[in-house]
Image (cartoon, rainbow, N blue to C red):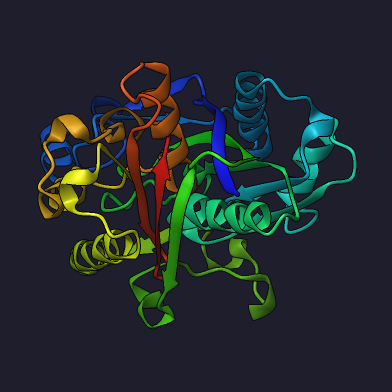
Amino acid sequence: MYARIIGTGRYLPEKVLTNKDLEQLVDTSDQWITERTGIRQRHVAAEGQTTCDLAEQAARQAMEDAGLKPGDIDLLLVGTTTPDLVFPSTACLLQHRMGMAECGAFDINAACSGFIYALSVADQYIRNGTARNVLVVGAETLTRMLDWNDRSTCVLFGDGAGAAVLTADENPGILSTHIHANGGYSDLLKVDVGVSRGFRAEARGGVSVSMKGNEVFKVAVNTLGRIVDETLAANNLEKEDLDWLIPHQANLRIIKATARKLKMSMDQVVVTVDRHGNTSAASVPMALDEALRSGAIKRGDKLLLEAFGGGFTWGAALVAY
């Protein structure tokens, strides 16, 4: 039994923040941002708009695409590092809004790898027969924890949500998933605020992302190269057997490095980073939905989804669409 993707959706907040806009906020330039990241604009959640609000829009779109009703869902997973509350989980809040009965619902925090991690969990539940239909969402409001005076980070991130509905099917779907982590790199990319450490964000100047960009870049490129090899080997496939690469949209240079590793043309790579920025756990499902709705991806195509994020965490999923 396979977990097959039967519906996808995405949602981006209305407000768009361009590189030109950022030039008015911080000492940077459109050219500097574009050359180093490939990002030209990003979306920013409105005042009062939460991660659950974004997730709901993407989830409803995915459910409509799948042709399922709320009562058909057996499990709801939300990958996010920016939950509405410490608890209840954003998944529980979303479950209530969607009118789903009492299916299992929980968040997964694996930073930018959150959707891949959640996809892997969903795949296991379906393969072992515990669930038949699973709704997987990646949603973030990362702009809420940016230091707008730090030009090394504030230019990178955006808000958004993507969703996918998986169902049990005898026809091929998710062929394999692979997830890893190494907490030894935690100081390279983090948000240095936590409940159990006994301090509040206000006392430390607010919540903000800190990142040592060059070091993160080097580890990301090498790590993603390894997981590509691992995924292909696990499925007895060669690089040329892949039809599409759907990567985490963090940095265009990282995306191009992974494509070179796979010897894939950029025409076979889904790229949204220029318009969305880094939306963390939301980036892969949004890119997947965009490619599907454009008609670029066809049934039977083999897709490699991959991501790398704080933790460090990283993961990949090979999908026969």
Q: In x, y percent, where is residue 297?
A: 34, 25
Q: Quadrant of residue 185?
A: bottom left
Q: Is residue 7 visible?
A: yes
Residue furthest bottom as drawn: 184
Nearer-the-camera pick, 208 or 315: 315
Residue furthest right as drawn: 101
Above or below 312: residue 47: above
Front in this rendered view, residue 183 or 21? 183
Image quarter hosting the C terminus = top left
Residue nearer the viewer, 260 or 200: 260
Residue 84, can we see it?
A: no
Percent of width and height locating residue 304: 33, 46
Number of numbered discs on residues: 0
Q: Position of residue 218 (x, y in %)?
A: 18, 67
Q: Quadrant of residue 299?
A: top left
Q: Residue furthest top?
A: 294
Instruction: Please give the name of the residue rendered at 48% of the width and 47% of the height, measured from the top-left corner.
Output: 174
Horizontally, residue 272 falls left or right of residue 2, namely: left
Q: Residue at x 44, y 50 (%)?
A: 146
Q: Is residue 156 left or right of residue 108?
A: left
- Residue at x 40%, y 78% (from the top left corner): 182
Quadrant of the rendered image containing residue 22: top left
Residue at image coords 39%, 60%: 309
**14 displayed left or right of 265:** right
- Residue at the extreme front of the image, as rendered: 170
Above or below, comparing residue 109 to residue 142 in the picture: below
Vertical side of 113 occupied by 273: above or below: above
